[in-house]
């Protein structure tokens, strides 16, 4: 009987540890995916290195005050302007077929009303192209806000990010910081977010089931001990 209990305990422990390792595995993958930013110099800490500010329609400068993170951000301000900012050639991130990506950037609007920031990514595939647009920031919000979107690559190629700012009026200013391009999922749409959610649920359920089985097993063992043997048995 002791051997059976020991074997059962080892099996239950193995199941619980397997489910727990699965959760940790997905957690590690998700963290690594979110931490790997494919945009170079995303926070403008190295000035406009790897960026190409278009000075023909407006002008950008590096601000050392009021950044979202770090010590610097990109800033454009004027009474009436149209400023454009690009990721610089040839530092375009490579895009892989079937992989889901998230594009994001932080913006801060000062004295701005209406639509002002039109940001989108231009993706050049072999034999085709695609544009992915980010949502408009809320003009009534004066603090930093994140705008983001996701897309799934339709082929191998490269991407450049285009940030277009249009502001008209006095004392208006737009700040941009922490631009991101990260892998969300790969291999046919496997989602790290869904994986970690399902893993958590499976792990909790697994522990509950294993615990219930152990309790039932020991109750049955204890109950059998209390049953007197049959006469003549």
Image (cartoon, helix red, strand yellow):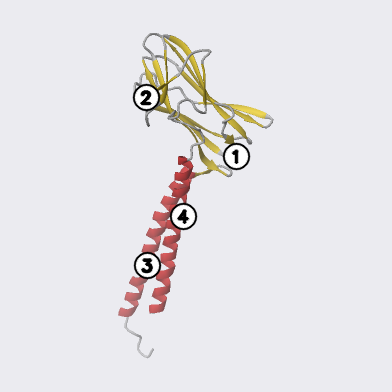
Q: CA distance from mark 4 to mark 2?
A: 44 Å
Q: Which residue is mark 2?
A: 64
Mark 2 lies on a secondary structure that is loop
Furthest-right residue in view? Answer: 127
Q: Position of residue 24 (x, y in %)?
A: 43, 53
Residue at position x 39%, y 54% from top?
Answer: 204
Label 4 sits on a secondary structure element that is: helix
Identify whether 107 is placed above or below 199: above
Residue that label 4 marks: 22
Q: CA distance from mark 2 to mark 1?
A: 39 Å
Could you say which is closer to the camera, residue 86 or residue 182?
86
If the image is split into quadrants, where does the N terminus sit? bottom left
Per the image, the residue denoted by label 1 is 98
Work out whether mark 2 precedes mark 1 in sequence or the reverse, and give the earlier one: 2
Q: From the image, which quarter does the C terminus lie in? A: bottom left
Q: Residue at x 46, y 11 (%)?
A: 81
Residue pointed to by mark 3? 214
From this view, report whether residue 78 is shown above or below residue 70: above
Q: Earlier in the sequence, mark 3 or mark 2?
A: 2
């Amino acid at each position: 009987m002791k051997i059976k209990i020991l074997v059962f305990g080892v099996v239950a422990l193995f199941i619980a540890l397997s489910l727990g390792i699965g959760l940790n595995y997905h957690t590690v993958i998700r963290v690594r995916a979110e931490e790997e930013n494919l945009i170079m110099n995303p926070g403008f800490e190295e000035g406009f290195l790897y960026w190409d500010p278009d000075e023909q329609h407006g002008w950008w400068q590096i601000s050392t005050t009021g950044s979202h993170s770090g010590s610097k951000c990109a800033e454009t301000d004027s009474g009436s302007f149209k400023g454009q900012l690009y990721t610089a050639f040839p530092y375009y991130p490579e895009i892989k077929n079937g992989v889901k990506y998230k594009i994001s950037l932080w913006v801060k609007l000062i004295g701005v009303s209406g639509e002002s920031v039109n940001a989108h990514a231009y993706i050049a595939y072999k034999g085709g192209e695609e544009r992915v647009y980010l949502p408009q920031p809320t003009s009534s919000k004066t603090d930093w806000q994140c705008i983001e979107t996701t897309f799934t690559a339709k082929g191998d190629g490269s991407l450049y990010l285009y940030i277009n700012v249009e502001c008209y009026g006095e004392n208006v200013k737009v700040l941009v910081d922490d631009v991101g391009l990260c892998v969300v999922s790969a291999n046919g749409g496997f989602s790290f977010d869904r994986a970690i959610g399902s893993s958590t649920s499976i792990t909790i359920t697994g522990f509950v089931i294993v615990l219930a089985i152990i309790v039932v097993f020991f109750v049955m063992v204890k109950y059998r001990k209390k049953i007197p043997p049959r006469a003549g048995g």
